[in-house]
Amino acid sequence: MLEAAIRVADRGGVEAITMRRVAQELGVEAMSLYHHVPNKDAILDGVADTVFAAIKLPSAECDDWRDAIRARASSARAVLSQHSWALGLMDSRRNPGPATLRHHDAVLGVLREAGFTLPMAAHAVSLIDSYISGFVLQEANLPMTTPDDVEEVAGSILEHLPTDELPYLTEMIVDHALRPGYDHTSEFSYGLDLILDALEARRR
C-alpha cells in the first residue's frame, strides 16, 4: 500500500495521496484500505518512513566522520531527487516511524562519537539537512538536467543579455557555465565539503 501511495505522489505530488487514488493504484475499493490503516494520516506517516528507510544510514565504523556523513548526504540527495515531494512531508509528521527514528539516531551517533557536543551535533544536523533539502528543491526546479540543457539555457540567456551592463553575469556564463566539462550537479559535493570542513573546524 505504501509503495502504491509513493507511486501516486511521484506522479502528482503529496497532495495527490488520497484513499481513493491509492485504492485505484492497487485496483481495490477505497473502503478496503481501512482494514489496514485507520486514515490517510497513517498512510502519510508510513510513506514518510518508507522514504527515510531508502536513505543509506551513515556507518559508525568510518575512520572519518565526514566520510560517513558525506555518504549519507549523497544517498539522501539521490532518494529525495526521486521523491522531491517528500521534502515537506518528512519534516511535518508528528508520529515518526521506526526507520525515521533509527535514521536520526544513526546520524547523531556518528556526530557524537566523533566528539561533537550535543548542541554542536544539533547544529550540524540542521545545517546539513537544510543544505540537502535546499539543493534537491533547487535541482527539481532548474530548467536543465544535462550538459546540453545547460548550453541551451545559458546560450539563450546570453543571447538577450546586455553584456555591458551585466559583466559579471556574462563572465559566469561564458567562462564558467559554457566551458567544456562544466557540470552543475558537482556543486552539491563542493558545498557539502565546505560545510563538513567548517563543522570539523568547530568540532576541534
Image (spheres, rainbow, N blue to C red):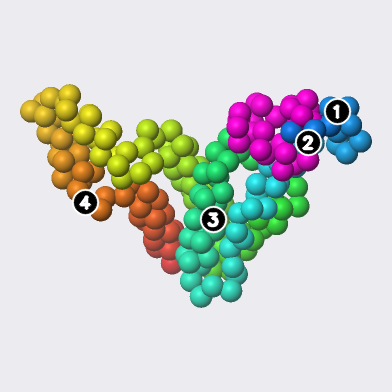
Q: Quadrant of residue 198?
A: bottom left
> Which mark is first along the chain, 3 or 4?
3
Q: Residue 85 at x, y = what percent?
A: 58, 35
The mark found on residue 160 in the picture is none
Q: CA distance from mark 1 to mark 2?
A: 9 Å
Relative to 125, does residue 149 appear above or below in the rendering?
A: above
Between the C-alphas of marks 3 and 2, the distance is 28 Å
Q: Residue under circle 3?
A: 75
Give amino acid for label 4. Pro
Quadrant occupied by the N terminus: top right
60 sits left or right of 174 in the view: right
Query: What's under tag 2, amino acid-wise?
Result: Leu
Which numbered disc, 4 or 1, marks the residue closer to the eye? 1
Using a 10 Å C-alpha cutoff, classify the residue at mark 4 as few (fewer than 14 neighbours), some (14 to 19) or many (20 or more). Answer: few
Let me know if residue 20 is in the magenta part.
yes
Mark 4 and mark 2: Cα distance apart in space: 47 Å
Q: How many tags in the picture?
A: 4
Q: Nearer the viewer, mark 4 or mark 3?
A: 4
Q: Which residue is mark 2?
A: 26
Taking the spot 72% from the left edge, 39% from the top edge, the residue there is: 4
Q: Secondary structure at mark 3?
A: helix
**Residue type beneath disc 3:** Ser
Q: Which residue is mark 4?
A: 180
Relative placement, left or right, of 185 versus 181 is right
CB under 8 Å between callouts 4 and 1? no
Q: Position of residue 13 (x, y in %)?
A: 60, 30
Q: Position of residue 153 (x, y in %)?
A: 28, 33
Nearest to the observer: residue 12 or residue 44: 12
